[in-house]
């Protein structure tokens, strides 16, 4: 099963952990990453993840997140089709960078786009071609649950 973690997921462990939801999402995200390492899930990475991660002001975080690119089974580069899909998603009210991440995940033939971004999750009904899901809900899927 091929999955795409958006930038918010990679950064979740660095968020304030005082909220129970944030702590749960962090633990589940770390479990997903362990399962990627074990080969249970195939990770997709994109040029926009590289770009966004490079904007992170914390060098240690940038370096840790950058390592995930080497574990990706597919690295997605920009194409006219990705940009066209991005514009379609933007027309449905999805922010440009979010639309680009989703477009890359679709182009990479991912089954799931995993995010903690409520703005994206609230628009999931407007997104065709991929299942947009929170990490906690992803973990509860029958094909994922252990």
Image (cartoon, rainbow, N blue to C red):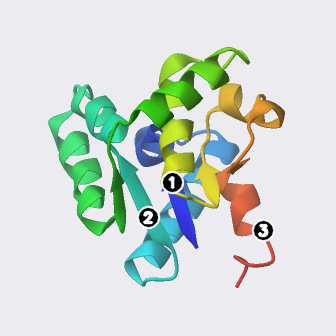
- Identify the residue at image location x=32%, y=30%: 52
- Local crowd size for mark 2, using a 10 Å CA cut-off: few (<14), some (14–19), many (≥20): many
Q: Does residue 79 appear to the left or right of 115 in the view shown?
A: left
- How many labels, in total? 3
Q: CA distance from mark 1 to mark 3?
A: 17 Å
Tell which of 77 and 42 is nearer to you: 77
Q: Earlier in the sequence, mark 1 or mark 3?
A: 1
Residue at mark 3: 140
Please tell me in which quadrant of the rendered image residue 144 appears. Answer: bottom right
Classify the position of the C terminus by image quarter.
bottom right
Q: CA distance from mark 2 to mark 1?
A: 6 Å
Residue 133 circle label: none
Residue at mark 2: 43
- Identify the residue at image location x=27%, y=29%: 56
Q: Between label 2 and label 3, give the one nearer the viewer.
A: 2
Q: Can you give x and y, in whole percent of width and height, for residue 45 in the image?
A: 37, 52
Q: Can you give x and y, in whole percent of width and height, for residue 65 in the image?
A: 29, 49
Residue at mark 1: 4
Q: Are marks 1 and 3 in contact (CB under 8 Å)?
A: no
Q: Please, what secondary structure does the residue beneath circle 3 have? A: loop
Q: Between label 1 and label 3, give the one nearer the viewer.
A: 1
Q: Does any portion of residue 3 appear in the rendered image? A: yes
Q: Earlier in the sequence, mark 2 or mark 1?
A: 1
Tell which of 21 and 136 is nearer to you: 136
Q: CA distance from mark 2 to mark 3?
A: 19 Å
Q: Are marks 2 and 1 in contact (CB under 8 Å)?
A: yes
As drawn, 6 above or below 67 = above
């Amino acid at each position: 099963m091929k999955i795409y973690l958006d930038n918010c997921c990679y950064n979740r462990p660095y968020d304030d952990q005082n909220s129970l939801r944030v702590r749960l999402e962090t633990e589940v995200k770390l479990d997903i990453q362990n399962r990627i390492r074990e080969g249970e899930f195939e990770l997709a990475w994109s040029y926009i993840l590289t770009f966004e991660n490079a904007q992170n002001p914390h060098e240690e975080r940038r370096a840790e997140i950058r390592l995930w690119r080497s574990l990706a089974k597919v690295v997605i580069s920009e194409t006219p089709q990705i940009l066209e899909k991005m514009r379609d998603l933007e027309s449905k009210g999805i922010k440009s960078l979010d639309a680009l991440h989703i477009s890359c995940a679709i182009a990479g033939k991912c089954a799931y786009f995993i995010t903690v971004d409520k703005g994206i999750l609230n628009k999931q009904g407007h997104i065709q071609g991929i299942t947009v899901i929170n990490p906690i809900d992803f973990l509860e899927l029958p094909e994922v649950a252990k």
